[in-house]
Image (tube, grey):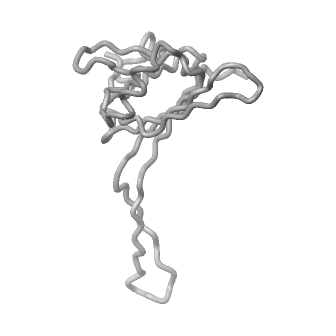
Amino acid sequence: MAAADTLSYDELVLEIEWVADSGTYSKICGITGVTINRTTNVTSTAVPDCADETLPHSTKNSVNSIAVSVSGTGVWAAAKHHELLDWFYNARKLNARLRNAKVEAGGDSGDIYAEYGPAILSSLTNERPGDKGEISASIELQFDGTPSRSTVV
């Protein structure tokens, strides 16, 4: 049996463009766990059988919209304390990028390796553990619109 080709931990990258229009993206120091949630909002319509309306209706589904959000967990790193609080309290949109470094480095032509676009920091949580230890952090970003995608050339 052949094992699946998988991504390693460091090949899924969440990056933020902290300075608008700079083209320079960097990771959020301390955030090591990243979860991407891609969802479609579906509209369902019941369609009757025209020959026999007593039969159960068929359901037709169509995609109404697409939403992409990203959550991250880790430790609260002093290196990004100011930037994260500024992003949240000023309700700014910053460009975010999700990058598959393995596909970017060695994917086939046309393979999607990055999703990017303006994002809102919709949730910022910290927790001080009761048994000492480091302050934890969790964040959630919501893309404003459908993210653009970059492909391997």
**Along the line of sight, which residue is nearer the eye, 108 or 147?**
147
* Residue at 33%, 19% in the rendered image: 18
**Residue extending furthest toward the right:** 131
**Residue extending furthest toward the left:** 21
Question: x and y percent of residue 72 in the render?
Answer: 54, 29
- Which quadrant: the N terminus? top right
Query: Quadrant location of residue 147?
Result: top left
Q: How many marks?
A: 0
- Which quadrant: the C terminus? top left
* Residue at 37%, 28% in the rendered image: 115
Question: x and y percent of residue 46 in the render?
Answer: 42, 74
* Residue at 77%, 25% in the rendered image: 131
Query: Quadrant location of residue 109?
Result: top left
**Along the line of sight, which residue is nearer the eye, 57 or 79?**
79
* Residue at 32%, 34% in the rendered image: 90
Query: Quadrant location of residue 50?
Result: bottom left
Question: x and y percent of residue 93 in the render?
Answer: 30, 33
